[in-house]
Image: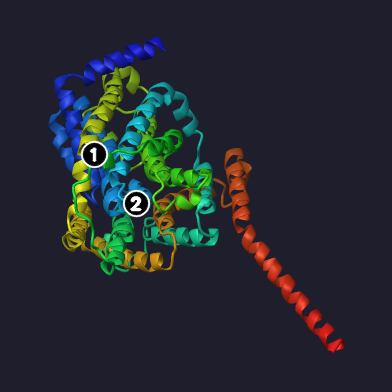
């Protein structure tokens, strides 16, 4: 412990250097803006700014890119809460109750809770990263393709079981997302499928256009025919700050979201996205008033926002300790390290202690910077609501279109966004949950790859999924959840069959006794 504190003091000496501190601030500011802008996200932001880091020293470069990464998690909640357009894919779940709070005049409180939850979760998860990185990374290495496949299946079933509506509806939406995720190049054979001659679909259907379409465009379409008259006034200070009750209701979700997010973030995959889904489902299941979710429950903001920030830090565990990227953004950051002549891997801590501990210390500094940047700007963000809908929604539509187009410079992405918006509009009219579509789209490539790798390991035998203890246990839990979720439907079917079987006897009795 003493050695860890000594190393951390070395890291703070590095992180507090004027040039490193400047780039940490720039990364946090850019990350916040990237998160606020619909359709951009940390992946696009880091990719665009990667060439800028070529002239920097390695520590400053990684610190700035890390600031963009977790800064985007802070900023992504802004448009989700105020306009129901997820600035970043990890903020999809925040749209649901964050926007409902805005409609009730509590948009400022939702932003404040999101900022504070992000700060607490980010700080605590950095402590966990500092203390638990080696053993947690070692545990994550035990997961082979069968365990990863079982974990992803279990995640889908957990979310479907915890959904507010019938499990069949949630699974149907998740299946639709999985089907969309099958578009693109087959990672095992290299063959293209379902691309219909469009080279833009070679890499699959992007999450950003689908998320912006399902949530943003559908919201604009739903609001187009509604009464848009509002009391346009400057919010008072007490309206911007959460009440004591809101702080009290947020405390436990922030704690649970921090733990869930960090643990999920370590596992390879888009942990910051999955963790927000899991956190929202857990909070709704644990709540004494689950009926409030979807109608402005502050727990539905505090939990997911804490989880996605914590997962972002968790993703640094395999990246810094093992040199293994757990997602696309860590992969780009590893590429940046190699560009600067740094060999990522287990020897990084011994060979580059200044870099390793400097990045960790910069996260502490970055969290403070992000809190300072976000909380004072709550009033500015809330004032966006003073813009009349007749100007706001066309501007949002144009801005979302430009943002989606800018990610890949692809008109196809714009058409995907438009189609997803129309589908989302119809599904929301039919009262279907659309969030599982995004989850299915995210998980589809990983599910397929791990499933096929598992079969390749076992020469085509499905038994490998059940013979390995960890994978078998997770699949058994998933089957149990599936049974529990389908039980009401099965009971209703048995009751219907029983009633149908009694009808002939009853009619026969009436015939015998006129």
Q: Which residue is mark 2?
A: 95
Q: Nearer the viewer, mark 2 or mark 1?
A: 1
Indicate the quadrant where residue 469 lies.
top right
Query: Residue 411 appears at what percent x and percent y?
Result: 21, 63
SS assignment at label 1: helix
> Which tag, 2 or 1, sits closer to the chain's start?
2
The relative height of residue 51 versus residue 159 in the rendered view (above or below) is above
* Residue shown at the point (29%, 36%) measured from the top left: 70
> Quadrant of residue 315 in the image?
top left
Residue 444 at x, y percent in the picture: 43, 54
| Residue 488 visible, this orientation | yes
Secondary structure under tag 2 reads: helix
| Mark 2 residue crowding within 10 angstroms, few (<14) / some (14–19) / many (20+) | many
Left or right of 329, for residue 174: right
Q: Check the picture and name the quadrant holding the C terminus.
A: bottom right
Residue 265 location, x and y as percent? Answer: 41, 37
Say if mark 2 contacts mark 1, CB within 8 Å: no
Neighbor class of circle 1 (other Cα within 10 Å; few <14, some 14-19, many 20+) is few
Marks 2/1: CA–CA distance:
23 Å
């Amino acid at each position: 412990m003493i050695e860890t504190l000594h190393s951390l003091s070395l890291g703070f000496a590095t992180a507090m250097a004027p040039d490193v501190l400047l780039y940490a601030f720039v990364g946090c500011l850019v990350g916040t803006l990237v998160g606020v802008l619909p359709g951009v996200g940390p992946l696009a932001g880091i990719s665009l700014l990667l060439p800028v880091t070529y002239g920097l020293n390695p520590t400053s470069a990684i610190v700035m890119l890390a600031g963009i990464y977790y800064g985007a998690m802070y900023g992504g909640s802004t448009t989700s809460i105020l306009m129901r357009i997820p600035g970043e894919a990890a903020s999809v779940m925040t749209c649901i109750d964050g926007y409902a709070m805005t409609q009730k005049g509590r948009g400022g409180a939702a932003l404040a809770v999101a900022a504070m939850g992000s700060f607490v979760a980010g700080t605590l998860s950095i402590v966990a990263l500092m203390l638990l990185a080696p053993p947690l990374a070692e545990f994550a290495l035990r997961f082979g393709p069968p365990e990863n496949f079982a974990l992803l299946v279990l995640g889908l079933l957990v979310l479907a079981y915890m959904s507010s509506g019938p499990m069949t509806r949630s699974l149907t939406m998740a299946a639709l997302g999985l089907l969309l995720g099958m578009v693109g190049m087959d990672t095992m054979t290299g063959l293209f499928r379902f691309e219909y001659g469009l080279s833009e679909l070679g890499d699959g259907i992007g999450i950003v256009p689908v998320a912006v379409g399902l949530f943003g465009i559908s919201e604009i379409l739903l609001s187009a025919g509604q009464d848009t008259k509002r009391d346009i006034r400057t919010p008072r200070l007490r309206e911007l700050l959460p009440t004591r009750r809101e702080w009290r209701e947020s405390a436990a979700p922030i704690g649970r979201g921090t733990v869930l997010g960090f643990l999920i973030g370590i596992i390879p995959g888009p942990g910051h996205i999955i963790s927000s889904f899991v956190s929202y489902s857990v909070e709704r299941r644990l709540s004494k008033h689950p009926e409030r979710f979807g109608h402005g429950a502050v727990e539905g903001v505090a939990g997911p926002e804490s989880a996605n920030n914590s997962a972002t830090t968790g993703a640094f565990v395999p990246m810094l300790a093992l040199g293994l990227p757990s997602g696309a953004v860590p992969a780009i950051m590893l590429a940046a390290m190699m560009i600067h002549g740094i060999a990522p891997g287990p020897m990084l801590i011994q060979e580059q202690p200044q870099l390793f501990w400097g990045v960790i210390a910069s996260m502490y500094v970055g969290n403070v910077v992000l809190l300072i940047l976000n909380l004072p700007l709550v009033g500015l963000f809330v004032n966006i609501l003073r813009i009349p809908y007749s100007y706001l929604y066309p501007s949002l539509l144009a801005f979302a279109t430009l943002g989606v187009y800018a990610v890949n410079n692809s008109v196809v992405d714009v058409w995907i966004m438009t189609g997803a918006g129309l589908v989302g509009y119809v599904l929301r009219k039919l009262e279907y949950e659309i969030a599982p579509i995004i989850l299915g789209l995210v998980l589809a490539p990983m599910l397929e790859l791990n499933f096929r790798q598992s079969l390749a390991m076992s020469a085509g035998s499905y038994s490998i999924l059940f013979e390995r203890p960890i994978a078998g246990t997770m699949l058994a839990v998933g089957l149990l959840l599936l049974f529990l979720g389908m039980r009401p439907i099965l009971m209703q079917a048995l009751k219907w069959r029983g009633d149908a079987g009694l009808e002939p006897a009853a009619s026969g009795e009436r015939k015998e006794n006129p």
